[in-house]
Amino acid sequence: MSLVPFVITVLLLLVVTLISAVISALETALLSLKEHHIAVIGETRPDLSGMMRAMVRQPHRSVHQVILLGSVLNLALAVLGLLLLREFGPLFQHRPYFSALILFGALILIGELIPTLAALAAPVQVFQALVRPFVWFSPLLENISEKLESLTDRWTRLLLPFSLHKRRDLTDDEIETLVEMRRDDGALAPGESEIIQEIIRLGNKTVKDCLTPRVDTLMISEDATNDEVRGQLREAPKIFWFVPIFQGSPDVVVGMLDVKRWLYHPEVDFCQFIAPPVFVPETMNALEAFRDYLSVPRSLCVVLDEYGGVEGVLSHADIVEEILADTAPAPDHEVEIEELSPGHLRADGDARLDEIGEALGIDLDHEGLDTIGGLVFNELGHVPKPGTRVEIDGLRITVRRCQPQRVTAVEIEKLSGNGNGNEPRET
């Protein structure tokens, strides 16, 4: 055995193994870094801020370069290991396979396993310690990487009958999962992720789910006088910036009164400050309505039902409230459904049938009806008096409060098999 070639081969093998260990650690650190890690590195190491910005813009580039360099080094290690065993004999006499197992096991342990575990334990520290040498070779590796990507794409298009780059639309569940992952990574605060998820869910809601019902909306006749309009605005429970103006019947809206502009000139007839109304169907997607008609604060749409009647109004504030209702509830927010005892609830008239059904463990699906107050009104055919009881779908519903046009509070008791189907019975 010639000593000089043997020593050179062993030294070369050790050098390549150490370089491979550095690249393996850097590769693992790159794959483990999150956006907040990159921001921290950019702040603590100003000399790396340029590279950090480049990585944020094109994170896959650096990863491709490191993987390419690691693959080349692993190939070199395999060639040098085989050359050592072939030219200079096995490490253990008459045991070539055992010698190969020991040699390549040591190479994997030193060049892959140990550096990978170290990078997983402390990715930021490993990246800061090893990134500088990588920067020196990055331009050369980038050119090679781009050429290999181009060559691979061409061969892929020739060999495969479909494109690997075809993208499909993500489902809402997949998008929500991605948002949760970003929250777990620390890129999003919990409150931010909840708001984003509410916006995603808004895409599945219709205008009818978000509108303010007509009975809660201030509407003014075009035949009213200025004094009558001012009186109605003063008696309103809240401030209205735009008010629907109707002709003859509230179902015939002819315009929107710009209250603020009119109050700057109260001596002028309010009809001079009426703008054309914007009508939207109740089945329109809420997110589309917000994007197309309500992007400006204080804007207002009139919502029409399938027969052309006015169902209510939809404002910019209604959409924002729908998004923030669960993430930032108002301090005076009242619970719509309150459990008094098992199978016994108190609920607002606006409480949704599906939520009441879920609380009681029954199916309360009634086509065209959404609220418990609407169900009682629809079954009886008139607005009942407080204290009225009616049995519907195995439930005894007692009206507790009502207004001239609707039921505002009820008490619900689940009957134990004594219900009489869908036939209402008023007492």
Image (cartoon, helix red, strand yellow):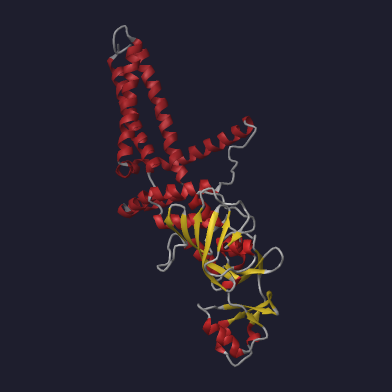
| Residue at position x 40%, y 27% in the image | 74
Can residue 299 be seen? no
Q: Nearer the viewer, residue 386 or 170?
A: 386
Q: Is residue 180 above or below residue 120?
A: below
Which residue ends up furthest to the top in the rendered image? Answer: 94
**Quarter that holds the C terminus:** bottom right
Q: Nearer the viewer, residue 188 or 115?
A: 188
Can residue 306 be seen? yes
Which residue ends up furthest to the bottom in the rendered image? Answer: 267
Residue 248: % across, % down: 70, 80
Residue 29: % across, % down: 36, 40
Q: Is residue 215 left or right of residue 21?
A: right
Q: Is residue 220 above or below residue 355?
A: below
| Residue at position x 48%, y 52% in the image | 359
**Quarter that holds the N terminus:** top left
Residue 158: % across, % down: 63, 32
Q: How many marks?
A: 0
